[in-house]
Image (tube, helix red, strand yellow):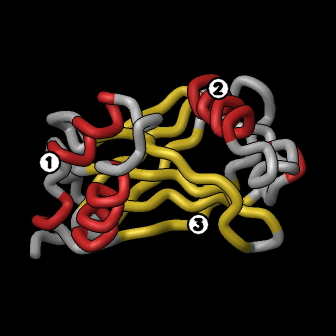
Amino acid sequence: MLRLPTRIEAHLIDTAGRALGEPGVLIAVNILSNGRYYFGNLVGLTNEAGVAAIEGVELELRFLDDRRRYPMDYKLELSECDELMEIVLLSADDIRQTSEAIEQGAEITPSIRSQYAAARNSNFTQAAVRVVGDAPEGNSLKVFLTTRPC
């Protein structure tokens, strides 16, 4: 059973474990069911400290909005998903492909379009981490994504 954390923070670090104060790197979260992708969304762009964050409530609202628009794709409740979730520094190819796809989508918000347009992910290697996202009530999740400049 998945209980979303109250907040998810993704911190960029280098291979020595030092914080990378790199703004403008787009981070995503993937929620899994039986080990496979079920729902994903953006955590957001990193700030000057190299940290991107999203509130659990916001992630849940985005899921409910997607579920309303695409009911056949989202039959499970988030609580029925795996305890593990992925936090991902999207690759330059992911950014490019998604940017091309969202040009066609009228339902894509200006905020999402602007985040993809501003993303500096091509400057860094892709990174992903699977973590236990299941959180007792009131707990947040802090993850570290190890990357390096390309």
Vertical arrangement, residue 73 with respect to residue 69, above or below = below
Secondary structure beneath label 2: helix
Amino acid type of the residue that numbered disc 3 sits on in the rendered structure = Arg
Q: Which residue is mark 3?
A: 130
Q: Badge 2: how crowded within 10 Å, few (<14), some, or many (20+)?
A: few
Q: Residue at x 36, y 70 (%)?
A: 127
Q: Mark 1 — residue?
A: 22
Q: Residue at x 57, y 25 (%)?
A: 58
Whole-percent x and y of residue 102?
Answer: 35, 50
Choose the circle earlier in sequence order: 2 or 3. Answer: 2
- Residue 15 visible in image: no
Q: Residues within 10 Å of mark 1 (few under 14, many from 20)?
A: some
Looking at the picture, tell me which residue is in the foreground, 34 or 144: 34
Label 1 residue SS: loop
Tags 2 and 1 in contact by the CB under 8 Å rule?
no
The percent position of residue 75, horizontal first and vertical second, equals 86, 49
Asked if 102 appears above or below 3 in the picture, the reply is below
Q: Residue shown at 79%/39% (left/top)?
A: 3
The residue to which callout 2 is attached is: 61
Q: Are dots 2 and 3 in contact, CB under 8 Å?
A: no
The CA span between labels 1 and 3 is: 22 Å
**Mark nearer the viewer, 2 or 1:** 2
